[in-house]
Amino acid sequence: MQKGGSVIEDIMEVTATSRHYVDRLFDPDPQKVLQGVIDMKNAVIGNNKQKANLIVLGAVPRLLYLLQQSSSSMELRTECAVVLGSLAMGTENNIKSLVDCHIIPALLQGLLSSDLIFIEACLRCLRTVFISPVTPVQLLYTDPTVIPHLMSLLSNSLRTQEYITQIFSHCCKTPEHQTILFNHGAIQNIAPLLISPSYKVRMQALKCFSVLAYENTQVSMTLVNVLVDGELLTQVFVKMMQRDQPIEMQLTAAKCLTYMCRASAIRTDDSCIVLKTLPCLVRMCSKEHLLEERVEGAETLAYLMEPDVELQRIASTTDHLVAMLADYFKYPSSVSAITDIKRLDHDLKHAHELRQAAFKLYASLGSNDEDIRKKITETENMMDRIVSGLSESSIKVRLAAVRCLHSLSRSVQQLRTSFHDHAVWKPLMKLLQNAPDEVLVMASSTLCNLLLEFSPSKEPILESGVIELLCSLTQSDSPALRVNGIWALMNMAFQADQKVKVEIVRCLGTEQLFRLLSDPDTNVLMKTLGLLRNLLSTRPHIDQIMSSHGKQIMQAVTLILEAEHSIEVKEQTLCILANIADGNTAKDLIMTNDDMLQKIKYYMGHSNVKLQLAATFCVSNLIWNEEDGSQERQDKLREMGFVDILHKLTQSSDPNLSDRAKTALQQYLA
Amino acid sequence: MSGQSSGGGFLMSVVVHGDSALNEQEKELNQRLRRLYPAVNENETPLPRSWSPKDKFSYIGLSQNNLRVHYKGHGKTPKDAASVRATHPIPAACGVYYFEVKIISKGRDGYMGIGLSAQGVNMNRLPDITFAKAGWDKHSYGYHGDDGHSFCSSGTGQPYGPTFTTGDVIGCCVNLINNTCFYTKNGHSLGIAFTDLPPNLYPTVGLQTPGEVVDANFGQHPFVFDIEDYMREWRTKIQAQIDRFPIGEREGEWQSMIQKMVASYLVHHSYCATAEAFAKSTDQAVHEELASIKNRQKIQKLVLSGRMGEAIETTQQLYPNLLERNPDLLFMLKVRQFIEMVNGTDSEVRCLGGRSPKSQDSYPGSPRPFSSPSHKASSSQPYLTGFDSNCCNGVTSNKSHSSSPHSHKPCPPGSGSTLPASDISLNGSRSQQPITSNDVDMEVDHFTNGVTESSSNGFLNGTSKHTTEPDDCDADMEVESAQSKRQLCGGSQAAIERMIHFGRELQSMSEHLRRECGKNSANKKMLKDAFSLLAYSDPWNSPVGYQLDAIQREPVCSTLNSAILETHNLPKQPPLAQAVGQAAQCLAMMARTGSGSCAFASVDDYLH
């Protein structure tokens, strides 16, 4: 009780003194006001409670008023900016209050002053406000004159350089921001700062370039031609990656070069990438660095080598990277839990980040090369880690884990072995039940691979009721999900049992099937045709499906052949027709449809060999001997002029096509 | 297998081939090795420069200056493996050592091993025990091309890196600080392969099947891997370790200790005004009477200005028994006096030459704090007295000296105006605040000047002035001595006679000394060298002319100074110099005992 009482007394006392500070701001004597602000400055330094009190007591509007008053002395205005900067150094709530009091426009206005000390104080405060996550960055761009003015202030002093570049690097979050800064000469204005005598300025300038270049071709292309003191910017970055430079600088320079490389401004086989950036990023993943640095290093490296198999190969043998990443899963370590609470807390905070970064990097490493995938799956407990990663609470980790699984699922060997041994399909199926779209895309894409016919996981997945899930995916708004759903169904239908095929057709429903056949996304259309083709294989299956859905299927085929579509789509459609022509009873659906026969004839004379071949296949199936009614069909088609066309096709320069035509003609001779 | 024999061999090969390209390569090699391993003393621990034709198994053939290795055995079984070591083991003072091997041909099966091995104890048992493929034997470490495995003193490997074959460049880096090793392939680090390596390993390659050919690069060419970048990282690490070395609770003591060291240094070299001011501002007691310091200063100035006769006389007056008890010292002083006579600077001959003994050549420079023999040897050109003051110290009291020569008579010290240290003393006395780091810095600065010969300000100053303004200096001389050229004993016949006479006295003193104290080869050589000056018509430009160089007065001066201090029970050497010397010795000892971090902790780095 006693203790509690004393705390309250303390608070009351603090509040009383705080009020005194605020009251002095209203003194009629400007000299006393100045002294009051100076005393306030000394009182708030490092004292969060005092800061909060002053804000509550309304010091901010008064300070802002004094700061903006042209009648105030320069000294007073400067001291006000300093106090406001100090208040901003407190908690996030402080920042929110300051922003609510419209501190940003007031300080930006202050930058128009001619007094450098005052400008620096305003910039310092602005910097502190803008680097806080609670400040909307858009506020920097509301007034279009602000950015050019900031650019012009860059030359004034080391401090203005440091603060302004720091503001830029924190407020450049979108391509639009990049473009605004770029258009106002950010590159030319900031590049010279990279060789500033001040480390802070160099570092902030470097950060600016990393945010400007990220996924921005225009900026990146410009950067490669920039000279700083006669030296190419890329070489300046390379120097900043030297191993005796501070880690932060090495890492940020590596990011700049990575972004420039990914924006195609630097080739992936350029020595500054292969021999400098990549090794630097691999080093950042090593145990001796801070957890944050390791996360950033791994993520940047994953991004750098994602599209390039050669970089993946080099990275996979550099400094035992694959084994080094295994350490990312060991946080919090059992040692830290016992010995050091602070460290445990730190480890816990970073554990998710570390895991997701490692999964991302593994995914990138293994995206092309079979040997690397093997190396990854052979890493200690790798598959177990992925499996548990798939069901982690953090979405970031789940997404990264499924990306990693997806990358590894491109390996036939892994599908046959480790994937099956660890029953990865189970958590994957669970993940598919309820997840955000980005996770669903990756997970369903992985599922496609798991449903390939040689995959031993295919059976258990089928039994787990996957068809319904996939059918529902085909109704998604996201084209990527629709593709993956129909793709998985296509893989599933390949050489499948009659039962499975019937189940797919039943579950999907012909209506949905036809909707997919008119999908605006060509990929969806292609996979749907692929599904149809897989469904319509082996004679009994063809007849059965055609007897129940023949009419609609023939309609759909007609529609596609009549519409504007790519050669691939038409070819796939003709192949479906050829499959139908292979059925016993299904044949009649074509033979009785003269319109369709005319279409086949048309495609036999098409300029594209692929289409000619598919159409010829179709005819060949229709006139095949040894089947009931083959004679009548042969006669009908002869009447329609097919034989003449076949004779012509035997002269084709394409050996496949002429062979196929000859085989067809032989049916008439038998 | 000593360093010398290898050095000889290398020279010979240059001579025999007489090939300029080869010469270029050797030059590049030497330059690169010096740049990479500046801390290595190659007289003690030579660096590997090629494969050893003696230290190899017979199935190995060498060519191209012992840099190319090929296999010439049958290569039927693993027993036919053979290897070769480099000429020398890797010196610990490298800190980080690196070499590369390019696979010229993988031969039949590409069973190549690249790595390190220790010298076999028993050279007779070489064939099958010591010379299996690198990595298969005790203290043998290798990375094999056929399977990419690493072998650590055993026949069974561990998965390590990728395989390698024709066209690949494999590098091997030994970190002598943490005793680990990593390999590189085509410029990419493959990660640590071995830990806990023993000292004194040789670069080694092993081959096993016919047709295998590899080339070594011990620094003959630029490396594919950026080893200098890796070394930068370790240099930074070691220096951070030094910078962060905890001084702990005794921080206050630390400061007073540094102040004491600075003060004692000033006293030792008789900068009395500076020492006084410094002691005052740092609140210290001076452990020597001021008068005594001034006496020493007076004698030192005489020695440094070449007026040896007066110096000896003054010493005998002020310290009556000193020279009688140190006959060797007296002999040394007399020999120097003889040299100064030849030079025309000793007061005895100068009187005879009709010049005012005090008209020139007081020594305005401060004594070189730690005179070093290597410096003297390098400056064969005779320096003129008074002129070389520049050479000793960057302080430029030179100008005033030539314009008003009389101000430079050995004046009562304490007036402070003529001392080169006067700016320091002024500085010290002006800023009466308790010692600031600034003061310390300055002292250290000043002190470096003397230590780092090649890079020292003072020295550069001296030489550059000497080369750029030789006419000036001659002109100076003309005005002062009314002579057109440097002449023996200042050109006076009487002086030459006096010098000859003195030489005879010296000769008899030497004989007397030998009878009394036994043979002393140092004395004998000293005398012989001094007398040799007379064998040349222009002693200044003779091979022994270096003796006339004013810099040679410094060791004499410091020996005399130390002897005087010793009689007062004061240290022969100032603690500051001792600490620096000790640090340098420590580093040398670390190099000998295999502590690689000495490579990145040069004392000079801290004396700036």
Image (cartoon, grey):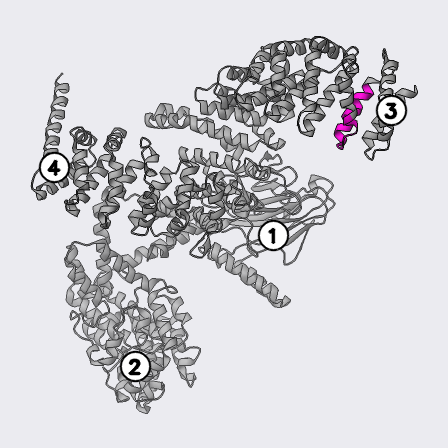
Front of the two marks 4 and 2: 4
The residues tagged by marks 3 and 2 sit, at their Cα atoms, a distance apart of: 127 Å
State which chain disc 3 sits on: A
Residue A446 in view: no
Tell me the number on the disc at residue A643: 3
The subunit carrying tag 4 is A
Density class for disc 3 (Cα within 10 Å; few <14, some 14-19, many ≥20) is some
Of residues A335 and A65, the one drawn nearer to the viewer in this rendering: A65
Q: Which mark is residue A25?
A: 4
Q: Amino acid at mark 4?
A: Leu
Q: Name the mark on residue A18.
A: none
Q: Which residue is mark 1?
A: B216
- Circles 1 and 4 in contact, beta carbons < 8 Å: no
Prevailing secondary structure class for the magenta stretch in the rendered image: helix
Q: Which residue is mark 2?
A: B345
Mark 3 vs 4, N-terminal side:
4
Q: Is residue A361 magenta?
A: no
Let me know if marks 3 and 4 both belong to one chain.
Answer: yes
| Left or right: A299 as drawn, with respect to B291 | right
Q: Tell me the amino acid under the disc marked 3.
A: Val
Q: Give the mark toward the camera: 2 or 1.
A: 1
* Quadrant location of the C terminus of chain B in the rendered image: bottom left
Nearer to the camera, A551 or B540: A551
Magenta segment boundaries in residue numbering: A602-621
- x and y percentages locating residue B98 in the rendered image: 53, 49
> Is residue B441 placed above or below A432 in the rendered structure?
below
Comparing labels 3 and 4, the label whose residue is closer to the camera? 3
